[in-house]
Image (cartoon, rainbow, N blue to C red):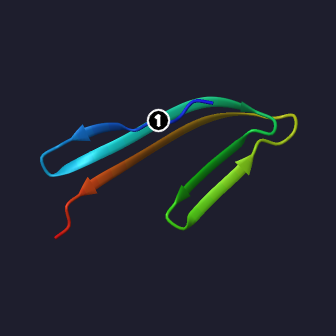
Amino acid sequence: MAELEFTVENLPAQVRYECTSEQVLTTGAQVGLRVGENTILKTVPAGKQWSVVGNIRVIEENVE
């Protein structure tokens, strides 16, 4: 299993973190995402295959 890693782009007023992953998942594999208190976790059903494309972008800004 490979770790997903963010690419980092530093801009004058913000920092952007982005990660994209494309994978084919077979029966029993899981797809999950948690953002704050919100979570989704799904399992590929028997006899199925999922092509999954995931992309997340986090934009960090100074708040004063």
Q: What residue is shown at x 63% (from left), y 49% (from top)?
A: 32
As rendered, which of 45 and 4 lies closer to the eye?
Answer: 4
Depth check: give the residue in front, 21 or 8.
Answer: 8
Residue 25 appears at what percent x and percent y? Answer: 71, 32
- Is 54 or 30 nearer to us in this picture? 30
Q: Which residue lies under the disc numbered 1?
A: 20
Counting from the top left corner in percent of width and height, residue 60 is at: 28, 54
Residue at x-position 68% and y-position 53%: 41
Q: Residue furthest bottom?
A: 64
Q: Of the residues shown, which amino acid type is indicated by label 1?
A: Thr
- Vertical placement of residue 40 versus 51, above or below: below
Would you identify the image quadrant in which residue 61 lies? bottom left
The location of residue 10, given as percent across then percent down, is 20, 41
x and y percentages locating residue 43 in the rendered image: 76, 46
Left or right: 44 in relation to 19: right
Residue, x 30% and y 52% (percent of image)?
A: 59
For the N terminus, the quadrant is: top right
Against 8, residue 42 (above or below) is below
The crowding category of the residue bearing disc 1, from other C-alpha atoms within 10 Å (few below 14, some 14 to 19, many at least 20), is few
Residue at (80, 39) in percent of width and height: 28
Most extreme residue toward the right is 46
**Tag 1's secondary structure?**
strand
- Quarter of the C terminus within the rendering: bottom left
Q: Would residue 7 appear left or right of 25 to someone viewing this image?
A: left
* Numbered disc total: 1
37 sits to left or right of 42: left
